[in-house]
Image (spheres, coloured by chain):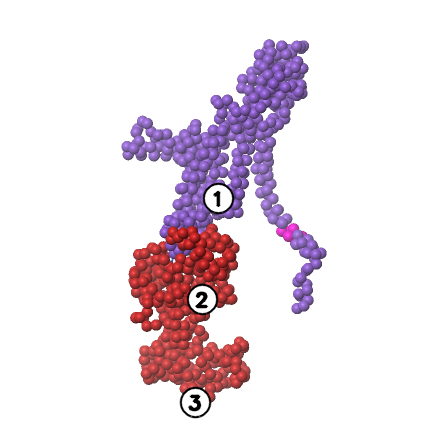
Amino acid sequence: MAEAVITAAPTEVSDAVNLKARLRSATARSRRNAFLLTAPLLIMLLITFIVPILDMLFRSIDDPIVGQAVPRAAIALEDWDSGAGLPSEEAYAALVADLAALRTGGSDGKALIGRFATRLNFEQPGVRSVITKTARKAPKLKEGPYKDALIKIHKKWGQPEIWAAIQRLSAPYTVVHFLASLDLHYDVEGSIVGQPEMRQVYITIWLRTLYISGLVTLLCILLGYPVAYLLATLPQRTSNLLIILVLLPFWTSLLVRTTSWIVVLGRNGVLLETLAWLGLVGDVDRPQLIYNMTGTIVAMTHILLPFMILPIYSVMRGISPTYMRAARSLGANPARAFYKVYLPQTVPGVGAGSILVFILAMGYYITPALVGGQNGTLISNFIAFHMQKSLNWGFAAALGAILLAGVLGLYWLYDRVVGVSNMKMG
Amino acid sequence: MPDSDIDTLVEFVGVQKSYDGETLVVKDLNLKVARGEFLTMLGPSGSGKTTVLMMVAGFEPATHGDILLDSVPINNVPPHKRGIGMVFQNYALFPHMTVFENLAFPLQVRRMGKAEVESKVQRALDMVRLGGFGHRRPGQLSGGQQQRVAVARALVFEPTLVLMDEPLGALDKNLREEMQYEIKHIHENLGVTMVYVTHDQSEALTMSNRIAVFDDGVIQQLATPESLYEMPENAFVAGFIGENNRLMGRVTEMNGQSCLVEVDAGGSVQALAINVDGVGTRTTLSLRPERVTINPAEGSCPNVFDAKVEELIYLGDHMRTRVSVCGHDDFIVKVPNSSGNVNLTPGEMVKVGWMAEDCRALDARE
Ligand SMILES: Nc1ncnc2c1ncn2[C@@H]1O[C@H](COP(=O)(O)OP(=O)(O)OP(=O)(O)O)[C@@H](O)[C@H]1O
Ligand SMILES: [Mg+2]
């Protein structure tokens, strides 16, 4: 007995240190095993998820073209003050030398001219032709003064704007994509100003994306909460059956679910035809229900609804019916008992469902592309446009980075307000 | 208590309940609960105790019959208008509210002023000795403290009737005994009527004014703790409350209060005729272990049998002795640990004896 008591009490400090070391070596093996088990997934995530995201973030600020295309001009323009007239003769000479070198540098050089022109054109619409024309003539310019020669080729070389753009873009990294994402740009003096009104697009799109995502989330709560409540209060066997109905949409493709709304909401679709047959809408001036914001909202709400129902349902399942009974026995009528006792306990489920739906909605692409028409498209449709059509990957990357930051910020906010550990997914 | 002159608060008149339309969970319940009484419903699991409480509280409709509160039928009164306090088995404290808010809830529902709410809540918390715990959440309390909050919440709005459904079921033995005392104390101080459900017989015996023993949806016996223990009216009650020796046999002779029973394994016993139909019927003889004497003085008992000591268990204040007698080898005798007592050894042959009044002839139900 006495011996057992002594050995069971390691009070010495060295003993405690020893114990920690022993514990660590004892658990090292199981930790290594755990790591090995997850390693394939981690590697896959790294390759297919984390690396592309990092690449995208890099692309959003990466801007090497101008520096590569006209290195001499970039150096010559380093000390030029864009507010104080045209650059010096050396800058003109350097640019001519750069363009001549590219022009005579084979197909690689000619391709770079094209990208250089495109890049500048993105900054200042209309200068593409100035660059290509000048580059074509540059090899023939053998001696100065180059300033007058260039201004003779195109009068834009006699204005500081184009030089300011070259100077600004010659840095390897840039925030212009981010500025453009928020309808901002650099003016001639290099200060950040708003885009002219007719070129303001993206603020509207961002606001529309937030608005539609918020509205869809709200609609999902309003439609999903009663369903979840019904599922949670029915006997288990019935509710399991109904849960399958909730999950059923996952078994059909997103494309099918979206396009079936075209059948329902279209001009000659099921809904309007029925309403017309009932005499509720006219045959000619029917309301437009699809290929606009309405279509996007309806279809997205339908598709995202399960993501709201399931977390709420799982939280409600865990709420014992005795709470409501207790509230009733204490004198609360059914409405009050629900509002004061039941509803607050379902907040974690509503929170989890909302954040899930909102984040998914923020990045939604296929549905708004198919049924969104003009005013029902979201930011991801513009990201896709710049990826596939305008080939301005840097700009697409900046839009994506802002979206990512926004979602992470939202998650952080949620954690601060509700607490992520309070979230219940199922 | 004679039925006619009690001040009845709750009355069940021919109440029946069936959940599935096939079996009756409660069969023809007739019961009057007096004002200020502590009435316990005691019975094995599934005997319908919770169902009865739920019908009183209004969460389950009675399939048939009436429940009267203050002589008014309440079958159609919704739960929140019945004004009955209830303590649930798992406490059902609202997890998202503090202890204070939990207790304030029934008062706010009744539109009480802020100051009044505060003073009443504080008084109720003091009553259960949790005065300083108002700001805590239920999750931050121990089981016993949660239990006391639940009691305080059921009492804070001063209901005349409080229902408790196995409120101490989840507590350990010490805490349980302490809480039994506390609830009893509160009952005496406040004078509320309590209907208490338990399946723990010692809890029922220590706390109640009267106990209704339930089995199979029927009240087997309704009586005070003493008479339930001393004078069980049927074999179920005798077996359910306290320890009990039973001998099966057949009635051979009836003479008024007493009867003669021929035990199956041989020998005849004089007993009190409590629940037998007449000569020739089968019966269960019920006998408390502490009423049996080992080696009784010559001529002091009418019933004396030879017995063999099988097992001795030392329990401090008494010796639990298992003997075989009349073909039963599970016959228990409690031998008090007093100085004059014989030292027994297993295998020894002894005589056991008991008085006719201590042996009750009951129904033959197994
Ligand atoms: N909601 C219900 N639906 C169907 N049957 C039920 C329901 N509630 C209880 N029962 C059945 O009614 C019978 C009595 O149940 P009850 O809960 O009243 O028993 P109890 O005496 O409280 O038991 P315990 O001591 O285990 O709590 C049981 O057979 C039970 O299976
Ligand atoms: Mg019960």
Q: Name the amino acid type tagged 2.
A: His
Q: Note whether ligand 1 is within 8 Å of mark 3.
A: no
Q: Which chain is red?
A: B
- Judging from the image, mark 1 belongs to the subunit labelled A
Looking at the rendering, the stretch of residues picked out in magenta corresponds to A25-30
Crowding around mark 2 (Cα neighbors within 10 Å: few <14, some 14 to 19, many 20+) is few
Q: Which mark is residue A90?
A: none
Q: Are marks 3 and 2 in contact (CB under 8 Å)?
A: no
* Mark before the other along the chain sequence, 3 or 2: 2
Q: Which mark is residue B299?
A: 3
In the image, residue B262 sits, relative to residue A91, either above or below, namely below
Crowding around mark 1 (Cα neighbors within 10 Å: few <14, some 14 to 19, many 20+) is many
Q: Note whether ligand 1 is within 8 Å of mark 1.
A: no
In the image, residue A135 sits, relative to residue A379, either above or below, namely above
Q: Secondary structure at mark 1?
A: helix
Give how far apart the Cα atoms at labels 3 and 1 are.
83 Å
**Residue A101 in sight here:** no
Tell me where residue A285 appears, x and y as whole percent: 32, 27
- Left or right of B71 in this view: A18: right
**Residue B1 in sight here:** yes
Q: Principal SS element in the magenta part?
A: helix
Give how far apart the Cα atoms at labels 1 and 2 are.
46 Å
